[in-house]
Image (cartoon, coloured by chain):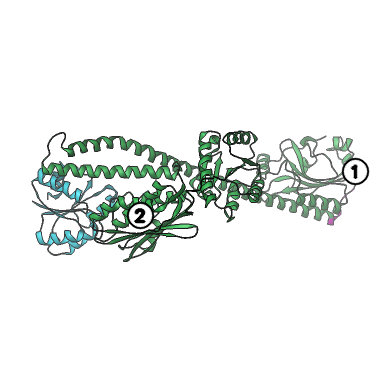
Amino acid sequence: MEIASLPDNERQRLAALHRYGILDTPPEDAFDELARLASMICATPIALITLVDETRQWFKARVGVSVRELSREIAVCAHTILGNDLLIIPDALEDPRFADNPLVVNTKLRFYAGVPLTTADGVNLGTLCVMDHQPRTLDDAQKSALRALARQAVGQLELRKQISERASAEEALRKTEDRIATILDEVEQMKKEFVASVSHELRTPLTSIRGSLGLLASGMVGELNEEATRVVGVAERNSIRLMTLINDLLDFEKLDNGKVQMNIRPIALRPVVEQAVDAVRSVAAHDRIRVELNVTDAMIFGDGSRLAQVIVNLLTNAVKYSHRGGVVTVTVQPASSWVEVRVRDRGVGIPAQAQKKLFQHFSQIDASDSRAKPGTGLGLAICTAIIEQHGGEIGVESVVGEGSTFWFRVRAASETAERRPVLPDLDVLLLDDDAALLESLTAQLAAAGVPVRVARSGEAGLAAVAEKAPGLIVLDLQLPDIDGFKVVSRLRNDPRRCDVPLLVYSTNELTTAERNRLQLGPTRFLKKSRANDAEFRAAVGQLLDYSRGRELT
Amino acid sequence: VKALVVDDEEDVRFVARLSLDRFGGMTVIEASSGEEGVSRAKNEQPDFILLDIMMPGMDGAATFLELQSGTDTAMIPIVFLTAKSMAAEAQRLIELGAKGVLFKPFNPMTLASEITAILRP
């Protein structure tokens, strides 16, 4: 038996073969079809599409053969790929190269005809071949058909390679995009941590500076003349300004990271508004600006001190941008399910394109706002974060030259909410497929006297909610059937269920964008690793309180 | 030497005035806006103007151009006193003929001598 020599371009040939990524892949119809056609046209029991690698010939498509590969040493095709055209062996027993080949001896193969699969680069990857158990040959029509089918097989290999190259390019692109998104999230996180830690560091020395200046100003450490008093006054006033700025930064950082737990419950809005107006009255009086109140009694769901902070912020802006001697009006407008608070000034107004940017961080520091009055530019960002955590809305209407109205809306509560003594018995729906965690959470809640329902998939959860709205849904974002984002969006799109509070936990820290997608109603976030401790129980308690308040209205 | 300090922040004007007065022996007049700065420059002909860039209404650049185009104010040297973030804008204005730029926060003890150094021919 003669073992085939290696083609001259063997290294290049093998490299090309591996680039096609076809070896050891499952059968494909396109190749199977070509082998069947070859077998039919040539009227042979056997037809193969083979690829010859370092040690074997592997069959991409096979008719009449059960093995998937053969050793290259005994492969007839190893001879075919040495040439450039059809190799025909009419009777192997008569051919000294193959007479003692085990294929001929054992499997009684006599006839072989194979065409090399030649790529555009001129390398032979393998063959399309037909075989028979008796000596014979092919007529001219069969020969040209076999050559044509071989070209088809090469075309199919090329097509396959292009598709897989495109897929891997797309895969690489997707991976790059994922990586960039991860890096951006990490940068965002680092930025937040940086802001928080730097702000803390800045406060320490500033406290000493403020304290010392305060002592100097008080005259306790020595009498100051008039000019020295003024110098110290400038320093003290500006150190307070700097402190306010740093506190705003810290406050915003906490709100933006969901580190502030709001105490949202039914409260009367009037005292909140009055408290806020009192806080800015002296500043307003300094510029002879009158603050008018147009408040009707209204019960809302809110955190009183946080909402007062929002109103103070809006009022401070209104006063700041009012003309001397102007009027600022605060109006409370109750609607059926919302209560709207409007703060109106008759100042210079805000151009439409600037209105959009207003609620972004640091927007006042933008150089285009030349009215750089004292302020951090964080005020409206803080207000937005607070209102969003109330599940409310905030916005502005403004006409240049006529003034601006900043407004926000929070949910209305009924007048009787505070007085009703009996609390409805609300249950918690646990939506997770983690059996161990479910057991532990159920036990914790049962110990606290909270009735629990359990659903182990997104669909089961939605069905349970449809059956009876729970007081709170505890949701794992990773569910076996539909993902948590979809569950939340379906839940929030149902008008009857859109305000059921949610406690969402996830294995990974959520990005701000992800939180925004989930925060379509009252929502609290927790890392899954914290779903089993006091933080979880506290969050459940608060959200159920919120629900009870809602239930009473 | 008569200095005109134009800045919308009263506290900054106050500290600058005290610095120029005590450490440079200068007479200092103030303006709280670009418009007021132009008018005081015309009427009182200071020896130089210390000008803020970020101001409401007529900002530092507009004030500078207004002063440059006035026959009786074009010759008054202008030094910008501004935040570091406005360095590029200050450089542009220096190319248009301003004398120099000093950045906030400034050292009250050396402000006068730094201005004198910039103005020295």
Chain bearing mark 1: A
Q: Amino acid at mark 2?
A: Leu
Give the answer, above or below, for where A186 lies relative to B89.
above
Q: Main secondary structure of the magenta part?
A: loop
Picture disc at residue A5: none
Find out whether residue A138 is within the magenta segment. yes
Answer with left or right where residue A259 lies relative to residue A40: left
Amino acid carrying label 1: it is: His
A78 relative position to A516: left or right = right
Quarter residue A254 falls in:
top left
> Chain letter of disc 2?
A
Residue at the spot 9% in from the left edge and 48% down from the top edge: B26
Which sits in the foreground, A241 or A542? A542
Q: Nearer the viewer, residue A401 or A131?
A: A401
SS for callout 1: loop
Please report the residue visible at 36 percent of the width from the left and 44 percent of the height from the top. Answer: A249
* In magenta segment, residue A56: no
**Chain letter tied to cyan:** B
Eye-nearest disc, 2 or 1? 2
A499 left or right, relative to A274: right
Pointer 2: what residue? A314
Q: How many marks?
A: 2
Q: Which mark is drawn over residue A133?
A: 1
Rendered hue of chain A is: green
Does residue B3 appear anywhere in the picture? yes
Q: Is residue A179 visible?
A: no
Cα distance in 3D space between marks 2 and 1: 94 Å
Q: Badge 1, how many Cα within 10 Å: few under 14, some, many 20+?
A: some
Closer to the camera, A320 or B72?
A: A320
Q: What residue span does the magenta drawing correspond to? A: A132-141
Question: Which residue corresponds to the image point at 81% horizontal and 47% vertical from the top-left?
Answer: A129
Q: Earlier in the sequence, mark 2 or mark 1?
A: 1
